[in-house]
Image (spheres, rainbow, N blue to C red):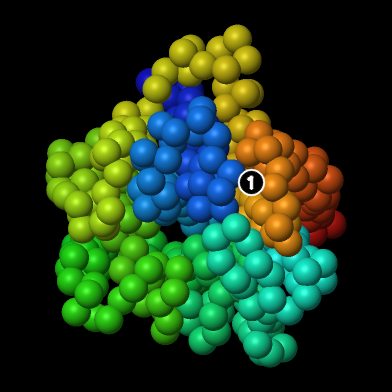
Amino acid sequence: MQTENRESRVGQWAVLAGLRFLLATIVLASHARHMGAALVVFGPLRLMGYQVAMIGFFLISGFSIAHSVRHPEGFYRRRLDRIYPVYLVGLLLALVPFMVWGPVVTTHAEKIGAPGSLWDLLGNAFFLQGITVRRIETNGPLWSLAVEALYYLFAPLFAKLRVRHLLALVGLSALAYVGRSRLGAGDWAYNMNGLSAFLLLWSWLLGFLAYKHGREIWMRLLLVAAAPLLLLYAPPTPILAIPIYLLVAAALLWPPKLGLLRAGGQKTLQYLGELSYPLYVVHWPILVLLCSGGQHHPALMVVAGCFLAAVLVYHGIDAPMRRRLAARQALRNEAQNSPAAA
């Protein structure tokens, strides 16, 4: 039984990795269209909508953090090591369009002004966008990493709370989400004072709860029956938003058999999942670079440029950094377990 559960969990991580790549591609499709570089093959992805992609990301993030926080020692370091190198690349890329086109970048869709002050840059560097500073518009999607950082900050506390307390937080967040217009909330990317983090906390906590309670009826009802109703309050709700949400929820609740992912399927999904984070972080500044200054490149070239940048960042920065950190951790563990340390 333990072997079967372990195999199911391994298969589940592979499926979730593939879903992360799908969600990142949905976001890319929405943003490429915004920049006037929509591909015909991306049409169905645009019908899914970036809103459900973000909620899917938070569901999967909550699930994975519930797994990681089981080992609280070094939790914050592991999280920072995992996300910051690529995040910093995305932040630096956000400055490149201003170096090329000047303090005002004109894309096919809008005019984007440079950050107003050094404080804005520092605030973005320390995940404070949406809390005390505005996001840098040449890499707008980084706002969600600031939300993630807040969730990471409180994750050890969430792990100690009782289920009923977490459900109370889910309920409060869901109520705020439904009534966000009365709170003066706008687009998730532009709210301040951490409001977006609270409005979307319900989705992250549902993923967090699903890690331990995914087999319980109340958890399945919450994820599959109740939570999708909230998507109707995220207008415009694309036609395929609910099926995509349910696909993510099903992957959290019903781990697949590992045997279904043999013959290279598991490795392929894992690799795509690894690419999803660099793709999400770097695609927007690449779109801005290729769709500014009156340039008119073929849509295929623009989208291919985003994927190529993600591959380069992953193999050039993300993967080597993770190997280095893993080796350092192995040495640390070896030192702790050595007879001398004992």
Residue 210, percent across and down?
32, 45
Q: Give the vertical position of 104 relative to 83 (above or below).
A: below
Left or right: where does residue 10 sit relative to residue 87?
A: left
Q: Quadrant of residue 71?
A: bottom right
Q: Give the vertical position of 4 relative to 71 (above or below).
A: above
Residue 118, percent across and down?
72, 88
Residue 187 appears in the picture as rendered: yes
Q: Give the vertical position of 282 relative to 214 (above or below).
A: below
Q: Residue at x 61, y 32 (%)?
A: 272
Dot 1 falls on a residue whose secondary structure is: helix
Q: In which quarter of the image is residue 215?
A: top left
Residue 137, percent across and down?
59, 70
Left or right: where does residue 230 sit relative to residue 341?
A: left
Residue 76 appears in the picture as rendered: no
Q: Residue at x 31, y 68 (%)?
A: 199
Residue type, numbered disc 1: Leu
Q: In which quarter of the image is the N terminus?
A: top left
Q: Which residue is drawn at 37% across and 57% down?
A: 204
Q: Nearer the viewer, residue 278 or 69?
A: 278
Q: Which of 49 and 314 is in front in this view?
A: 49
Residue 193, percent across and down?
42, 84
Q: Nearer the viewer, residue 210 or 61?
A: 61
Q: Which residue is drawn at 39% across and 67% down?
A: 188
Q: In which quarter of the image is residue 254?
A: top left
Count how many numbered circles sit on residues in the image: 1
To which residue does mark 1 refer? 279
Q: Quadrant of the C terminus?
A: bottom right
For mark 1, does the 10 Å Cα neighbourhood hold few (<14), some (14 to 19), or many (20 or more) residues?
A: many
